[in-house]
Amino acid sequence: SRSINLAVIPGDGIGQEVVAQGLKVLRAVLPQDVKLETKEYDLGARRWHRTGETLPDAELEALKGHDALLLGAIGDPSVPSGVLERGLLLKLRFAFDHYVNLRPSKLFPNTATPLAGRPDIDFVVVREGTEGPYTGNGGSLRTGTPAEVATEVSVNTAYGVERVVRDAYERANARPRKKLTLVHKNNVLVYAGHMWKKIFDRVGEEYPEVTTDYLHVDAATIFFVTQPERFDVIVTDNLFGDILTDLAAAVTGGIGLAASGNINPAGDFPSMFEPVHGSAPDIAGQGKADPTATVLSVALLLRHLGHEAEAVRIEEAVSADLAARTGAAARTTDEIGDALAVRVAN
Amino acid sequence: SRSINLAVIPGDGIGQEVVAQGLKVLRAVLPQDVKLETKEYDLGARRWHRTGETLPDAELEALKGHDALLLGAIGDPSVPSGVLERGLLLKLRFAFDHYVNLRPSKLFPNTATPLAGRPDIDFVVVREGTEGPYTGNGGSLRTGTPAEVATEVSVNTAYGVERVVRDAYERANARPRKKLTLVHKNNVLVYAGHMWKKIFDRVGEEYPEVTTDYLHVDAATIFFVTQPERFDVIVTDNLFGDILTDLAAAVTGGIGLAASGNINPAGDFPSMFEPVHGSAPDIAGQGKADPTATVLSVALLLRHLGHEAEAVRIEEAVSADLAARTGAAARTTDEIGDALAVRVAN
Ligand SMILES: CC(C)[C@H](C(=O)O)[C@@H](O)C(=O)O
Ligand SMILES: CC(C)[C@H](C(=O)O)[C@@H](O)C(=O)O
């Protein structure tokens, strides 16, 4: 479309800094005739301290009116663990039915990886985003006593699993290697695991060209470090996807480069794009954060909204920027953003 | 004690081969005056195919009479996923209340690690073994229909968490670095996660010399590959421990070297020792399996039964054996077992 009405949630810690660079690059890459409107939402730790609110209904409603959301990072040590995560970040993912949490991993040239031999890594994790152990089901009985029982319920539906599995097959089918790996733990989590596997196998019949594979999550972590080149597309549950994509980021240049999209493919609600990294309060406000993950998330945002050429321009700019990097002085957040903005504008 | 009455469950795939070497080294290391009795139990895939049984009550009863169990590996592709895992392996862990699943990770000299720079890795994971998402709680409603709902319930009790956390503090306190890291996901799994954290903090007051740390499981996987030297003792839940210890094995020379003990510290039931690796049906019967993980599990077994000197002798033998390894021809399972038996006998 010829206009983008973007909601921006800088959030906490380095969120503000990296989002500023993401917007800078977005402005630089967009053709003149695409009108960009942005509206900033003050959500996160400061807001919570001030008002006690995480995500009021009125703002949730207002957010629905946007074409997409760009989010920096959520979370601060001054807020009890879980309050902002559950009350804001996960609330958005659930309210906007972001059932595809898309997390590509690519080892760009000239980036640091802890892996010897620099394997050729280029895969994408399709993490389910609205079910599993993330539903907030569960509770605590006799809290704080020696007799306390605390439960967490992983809720999985055929409806929810089939739609994300199908999305993953579509993505695998559109890639040259056409390979899809299901990751679960169906030798222990037999109820959810068997349902995932059955649906995975059944939907697979509709994609005869896609080669499939199954791995238990523990074995998958081994292959992430010993043979990451074996992966093309991975589909997995919400919690396994959370764990695997941090590991994936670590082996592909670090969390500073890992982008993600929380996508509602049906388009019922706006999708939300955010770096995989957190708010990193220890380096906030110092211009040390790498905005590349946010910039790459902007590329995913553009692709989702149909601006494929611009998405590719950003990805190529990041690749070129990383390749041109010298071992010299570390660049500031702003310098990296400027460099990328210049590259995409050309 | 001057006698060991050992139950041996070779199990499936390479289990038979590696257990044979474990016993060989055990016989070689034991002083003449320690009487070793072993009784083999035919449990696993073959038994299940023959009789439909996984672990009959009579055998469970008989196993209780042993001082310890040595297990090879459980699982075969010919058996539906979960049948042997839940019906045999996990059944033993639960029936014998193996609440400490002990998994040391050490990067021995001259072993392959996928990590560049060969960091100095020497930590131990204390994985809870009797709760969490492994309890088999959960179910499936409208199974096989488009309206199916499948749940998995993670059950956590203050009783269960406190005892394993306390065990981990004891272990941390006994090590030179005295550092204990709790790994959970308390920003999402708030009921279980907060209970773990509260108990972790409270028990910590009794161990003023132990430095503590908390990491979300996703962040922990990053540090496993970027900074594994930061870990000393890790305590975590059953599922996170499963995932993390495979990753730990991968970065410390591979799954062929990773030992584990399923321990009942109270001594109410026999503890069980097993390599972390699976039954590896693809290489079974070919003499290709590395028995070192099983041999190191035998060291944990000896330590548990009070034979500390013999445990250390095995660990030193493994270290020396690995250091002496040349890049030459791969050794057979038997050759590695022989080499270790010779070393411990000296
Ligand atoms: C902050 C947290 C709730 C979140 C998650 O667990 O999904 C984060 O780790 C992520 O991966 O986006
Ligand atoms: C085989 C399986 C049930 C088991 C587990 O998940 O505990 C294995 O992965 C392990 O780590 O011992």
Image (spheres, coloured by chain):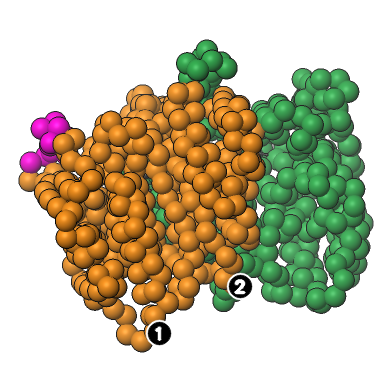
Chain colours: A green, B orange
Kindly identify which residue carries mark 2: B117
Q: Identify residue type, mark 2.
A: Gly
Q: Which residue is drawn at 78% across and 52% down?
A: A294
Asked if the beta carbon under badge 2 is closer than 8 A to the nearest atom of ligand 1, the reply is: no
Classify mark 1: helix, strand or loop.
Answer: loop
Q: Residue A219 in the image: x percent, y percent?
A: 42, 55
Graded by Cα atoms within 10 Å as few (under 14), some (14 to 19) or many (20 or more), the crowding at tag 1 reads few
Q: Is residue B61 magenta?
A: yes
Measured in 3D between alpha carbons, the distance from the residue under mark 1 to the one under mark 2, in whole angstroms, is: 19 Å
A345 is higher (above) or lower (below) than A183: below
Q: Where is residue A197 in the image (x, y as percent from the top left)?
A: 37, 44
Q: Which quarter is ligand 1 in?
A: top right
Residue furthest toward the front? Answer: B33
Name the spot of residue A259 as percent of width and height, x first: 70, 53
Q: Residues within 10 Å of mark 2 (few under 14, many from 20)?
A: few
Q: Report the magenta residues as a range.
A: B51-62
Residue at horizontal 85%, vertical 47%?
A284
Q: Which residue is drawn at 53% across and 50% down?
A: B175
Q: Residue type at mark 1: give it.
A: Gly
